[in-house]
Image (cartoon, rainbow, N blue to C red):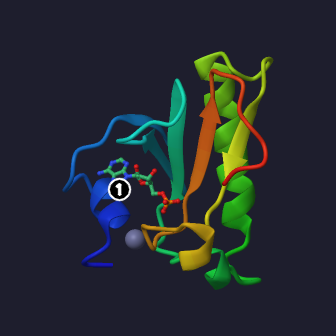
């Protein structure tokens, strides 16, 4: 998608702090971290949001969670715990319209979110 920020990051057109990549998934440090570990995990395929997950592309969600687990282990937060968050749509707080999951950890996280 030509004007999508995260598609440009995946393509290397915009720099990012890459932490993980495989055939399906790309993960990079959030530019404005809310926790000591704040990684964004995205499908390489452009999917705008959770609303665009279908029977055909749903497998990407398990790939993303497998990547999250690996990254949590590598970052040393698997034992202590962490949070995986998806914001969907305007009321959900989604600002970038390319499906992404936030992996947050490294501190005790509050609940509920705002
Ligand atoms: P959301 O509000 O769920 O759509 O999350 C979008 C996230 O993308 C925010 O946490 C931003 O800080 C992050 N973000 C925006 N631009 C960049 C960028 N160029 N590199 C890394 N993270 C970014
Ligand atoms: Zn995109």
Where on the picture, by quarter, is residue 32? top left
Determine the residue located farthest toward the front in the rendered image. 114
Residue 1 visible at all:
yes
Q: Position of residue 29 (x, y in %)?
A: 42, 37
Where on the picture, by quarter, is residue 11? bottom left
The total number of labels drawn is 1
Specify few, some or many for label 1: CA neighbours under 10 Å numbering under 14, 14-19, or 20 or more.
many
Relative to 19, 110 lies left or right? right
* Residue depicted at x 78% and y 26%: 81
Q: Please state, as top left, top right, bottom left or bottom right, where the N terminus lies in the image.
A: bottom left
* Position above or below: 93 against 55: above
Out of 72 and 94, give the one closest to the viewer: 94
Determine the residue located farthest toward the left in the rendered image. 13
Out of 114 and 88, give the one closest to the viewer: 114
Q: Position of residue 14 (x, y in %)?
A: 21, 53
Relative to 49, 113 lies left or right? right
* Position above or below: 69 against 5: above
Out of 99 and 91, give the one closest to the viewer: 91
SS assignment at label 1: helix
Relative to 27, 67 lies left or right? right
Ligand 2 under 8 Å from disc 1 Cβ: yes
Q: Please state, as top left, top right, bottom left or bottom right, where the C terminus lies in the image.
A: bottom right
Q: Position of residue 104 (x, y in %)?
A: 62, 36
Residue under label 1: 10
* Residue depicted at x 65% and y 22%: 107
Q: Position of residue 99 (x, y in %)?
A: 54, 67
Residue 23 visible at all:
no
């Amino acid at each position: 998608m030509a004007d999508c920020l995260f598609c440009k990051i995946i393509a290397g057109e915009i720099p990012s702090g890459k932490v993980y990549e495989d055939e399906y998934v790309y993960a990079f440090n959030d530019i404005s971290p809310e926790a000591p570990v704040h990684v964004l995990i995205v499908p390489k395929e452009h999917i705008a949001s959770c609303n665009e997950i279908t029977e055909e592309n749903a497998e990407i969600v398990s790939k993303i969670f497998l990547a999250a687990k690996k990254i949590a282990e590598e970052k040393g937060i698997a034992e202590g715990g962490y949070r995986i968050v998806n914001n969907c749509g305007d009321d959900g707080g989604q600002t970038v319209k390319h499906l992404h999951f936030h992996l947050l950890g490294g501190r005790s996280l509050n609940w509920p979110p705002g």
